[in-house]
Structures are given as C-alpha cells and as structure tokens.
C-alpha cells in the first residue's frame, strides 16, 4: 500500500501518523527528519522484539542511531511503576539526554508503559510509537494517553503525553492471532458507530475479509479509524470532554472486565459486548431505531461475542457499573447511539433497564 499520513494537532504541536507497508525499515530515516541522530532507547516485549526488533535496530543503526534496548515480559502485568522504573534505569545507563527519544515497539502495553516513562524521565523526552497490534494501531498509539496500572486499578497513574511521530507498518499485523485481531476490530467498529456512518457501511460489506486478516483492507481500516480518532481528539481541545464519546461500549465493557478480574476478556472482547448492550439500552429508550440496533448487533455478532464465564451474574456486573468513576449520583453515564454515526452522552437512572440489557447478554 502507498503510504498515508494523518496529522494530529495537540495544544503544543502537531505530529504525523504514517501508515505505510514496510515502514519499520525506514524508522531511522523517519527519525532523522525530526531529530539529529544520536542515542535512543527502544522498549519492546519479548515476543514483539523477537519478531521485529532486529529489523528496527538495523534501520536505526544504518542512519547512525545508537540504540539501547529494554525488553519487558508481554502482558498487562508489566504495565506497572516497577516496569517504568526499569525503563528509567535503562535510560540512565544509556546516557539519554532530554532530546533522546524513547521508542515504543509493541502493543498497547509497551506503548502505555514506555510512554509513561518517556513523559516523566528528565521531565519528558520525545516519544516515538511503533504500534504492532491492531488495537495499538487504531487506538492506543494515537491520542496521547499514557499510563501504568496500580494494584487498585487499571491506568490509575498516567498523563496525556502525545508522541512526536507514530509509524504504523501494516505488515506487522500478519503475525497477530485472530483473537487479537477481533479485539482490534471492536475499536474500529466503534469509530463507525460514533462518528462515521459511511465507514460503518464500509465495514458491513468487508467484515469477512477483515476477519481473515487481509492486510491491505486492515491498513485501510486503520487509516479510516485514525482519521476518526484524530478528529475526536482535536475537537476535544475546543469542546471540553468531546473525547468522552470514545467511551462508547466501554461503560459495560469495563464493568465486564472488572467483574472478571481482567482475566477472562480481552479489552476489545468486552467492548464488543458493551456496544451491543449500549445499543439495546438506546433502543429501549427510543433513541435508536430497531433497524439500526439490528445492524449494529449483526455486525458485532459477525466478529463474535465471547460467551460469559460460568458464574458471572448480572448483579456482579451492575455492581461494577455503580462503582464507575463517571457516575453522577444515581445516574450512570452512557454513550448512546441515536443513529449510526452519531452518539450522545446520556445519564441513565433506570437501573432495571440496564440490568435487562446485561441479562440478555448473560442469557439470564
Ligand atoms: N493509551 C490509550 O489510549 C489506550 C487505549 C486502549 C488501550 N490501551 C491499553 O493497551 C493495552 C492493551 O494493548 P494490546 O491489546 O495491544 O495488548 P498487548 O500490548 O498486551 O499485546 C497483546 C499481545 O500481542 C503480542 N503482539 C504484539 N504485536 C504483535 C504482532 N505484530 N504479532 C504477534 N504478536 C504480537 C504481544 O506480545 C502481546 O502478547 C492495555 O493495557 C490498555 O489499557 C491504551
Ligand atoms: Zn477501548
């Protein structure tokens, strides 16, 4: 695929997001357009490093970059303050200065952790994102949210720290397993529902090929998703809290993840279910028509909904919903579609209605 570029405006600066087949081989050249080459710290996990680490280091060395590496264990449990601390140690050992970039090569875990470390080391060094999962490419690498987990909850410690450049190589998706691909598709479908009905239609007609992992189609889906996300993030600078619409499907999604101690669902799997539940709530509140509710359900069912684990009760899910930080008094705050391509933030106080929608998924 020919390269494409999206520019994302932030309060301080504008950064490019490049989507280009084979672009990992050009990492050094792309960085040289931004900084004089010197030292950099590459952060990755063992799995991603074994797939693409050598390629990236070679591309950097050939453009006179001196690269040190720090490799973490794959998985959410690495996203901690202790993990960040290991990155600070490596950055000190590599003698990074304030202009030396931290390069995150991996999925959302590596991006969030390396991003958090970059935002705090020497009060902030440049951050470069090389996202390698579909989720990281369409969501976590763009928008500037960086964080680590705390024993009391996910993403408790973090900040907004935009990267200087995001380089997306769609070829990396070829090694991704189908479960991870489906989890990424959840966020892609979300963009269609919240801001772009044409994109939703595009997805309806191509979902089977996307599920098969056809890489030029996935690249196109990544591009259209990031255009949507960039628009939302930029508009948020003027319209406070506009980016809350990105939480569509996440109210119930997060509750499902929390009620199962983050061990049963991938984030995207929980969001797929959350989007169906939210659409059903919107339908029962007469905000969303029957046809559109059915279309949303149909597309999501094609991706597949993970069955609930034995023993998960509606009460446990509702309990987690009530603990949601975003609740206001008795009102639970939902992002609800009013048509495909449009959502509104709506406080819902009819807990029985929410419970019915959750029970329908649980089959209770
Ligand atoms: N910052 C944000 O705005 C934001 C948004 C959404 C999610 N997140 C965070 O992202 C994290 C989840 O990210 P994720 O889903 O990418 O998970 P992940 O980073 O754990 O990656 C999933 C698995 O895929 C492997 N992997 C990565 N790239 C691969 C490739 N190309 N081929 C084969 N295997 C590959 C990884 O080693 C890992 O085992 C969570 O911590 C979540 O909180 C952040
Ligand atoms: Zn999400």
Image (cartoon, rainbow, N blue to C red):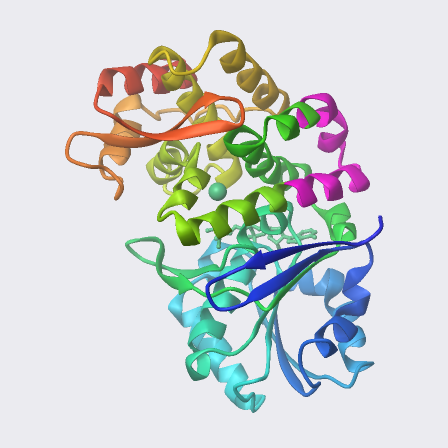
The spot of residue 99 in percent (x, y) is 57, 84
**Residue 261 placement, left or right of 128:** left
Residue at (70, 27) in percent of width and height: 202
Residue at (44, 32) in percent of width and height: 249
**Residue 15 placement, left or right of 158:** right
Residue 313 in sight in this render: yes
Q: Using the image as rendered, state which of residue 90 and residue 205 is in the foreground.
A: 205
Q: Any magenta on residue 179?
A: no
Residue at (58, 42) in percent of width and height: 228
**Residue 159 placement, left or right of 307:** left
Q: Which residue lies most toward the top here?
A: 290
Residue at (35, 40) in percent of width and height: 258
Does 144 sit above or below residue 295? below
The spot of residue 313 in percent (x, y) is 31, 23
State which region is magenta.
Answer: 203-224
The spot of residue 5 in percent (x, y) is 71, 55
Q: Main secondary structure of the magenta part?
A: helix
User: Which image quadrant: the C terminus?
Assistant: top left
Q: Which residue lies most toward the left here?
A: 329
């Amino acid at each position: 695929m020919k390269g494409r570029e999206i520019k994302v405006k932030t309060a301080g600066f504008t950064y490019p997001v490049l989507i280009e087949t084979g672009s990992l081989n050009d990492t050094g050249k792309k960085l040289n357009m931004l900084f004089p080459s010197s030292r950099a710290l590459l952060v990755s996990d063992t799995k991603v490093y074994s797939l693409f680490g050598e390629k990236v280091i070679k591309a950097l060395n050939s453009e006179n970059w001196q690269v040190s590496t720090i490799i973490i264990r794959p998985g959410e449990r690495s996203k901690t303050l202790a993990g960040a601390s290991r990155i600070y140690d490596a950055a000190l050992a590599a003698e990074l200065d304030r202009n030396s970039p931290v390069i995150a090569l991996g999925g959302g875990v590596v991006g969030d952790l390396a991003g958090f470390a970059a935002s705090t080391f020497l009060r902030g060094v440049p951050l470069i994102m090389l996202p390698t999962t579909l989720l990281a490419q369409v969501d976590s690498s763009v928008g500037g949210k960086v964080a680590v987990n705390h024993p009391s909850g996910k993403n408790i410690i973090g900040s907004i720290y935009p990267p200087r450049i995001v380089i997306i190589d769609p070829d990396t998706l070829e090694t991704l397993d189908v479960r991870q691909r489906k989890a990424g598709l959840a966020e892609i479908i979300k963009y269609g529902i919240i801001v772009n009905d044409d994109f939703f239609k595009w997805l309806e007609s191509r979902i089977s090929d996307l599920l098969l992992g056809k890489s030029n189609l996935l690249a196109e889906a990544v591009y259209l998703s990031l255009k949507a996300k960039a628009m939302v993030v930029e508009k948020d600078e003027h319209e406070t809290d506009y980016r809350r619409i990105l939480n569509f499907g996440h109210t119930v999604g997060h509750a499902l993840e929390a009620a199962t101690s983050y061990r049963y669902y991938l984030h995207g799997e929980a969001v797929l279910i959350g989007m169906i539940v939210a659409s059903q709530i919107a339908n029962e509140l007469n905000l969303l028509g029957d046809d559109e509710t059915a279309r949303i359900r149909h597309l999501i069912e094609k991706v597949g909904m993970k069955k609930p684990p034995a023993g998960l009760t509606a009460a446990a899910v509702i309990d987690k919903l009530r603990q949601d930080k975003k609740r206001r008094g008795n009102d639970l705050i939902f992002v609800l579609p009013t048509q495909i391509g449009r959502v509104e933030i709506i406080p819902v106080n009819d807990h029985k209605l929410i419970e019915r929608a959750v029970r329908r998924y649980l089959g209770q």
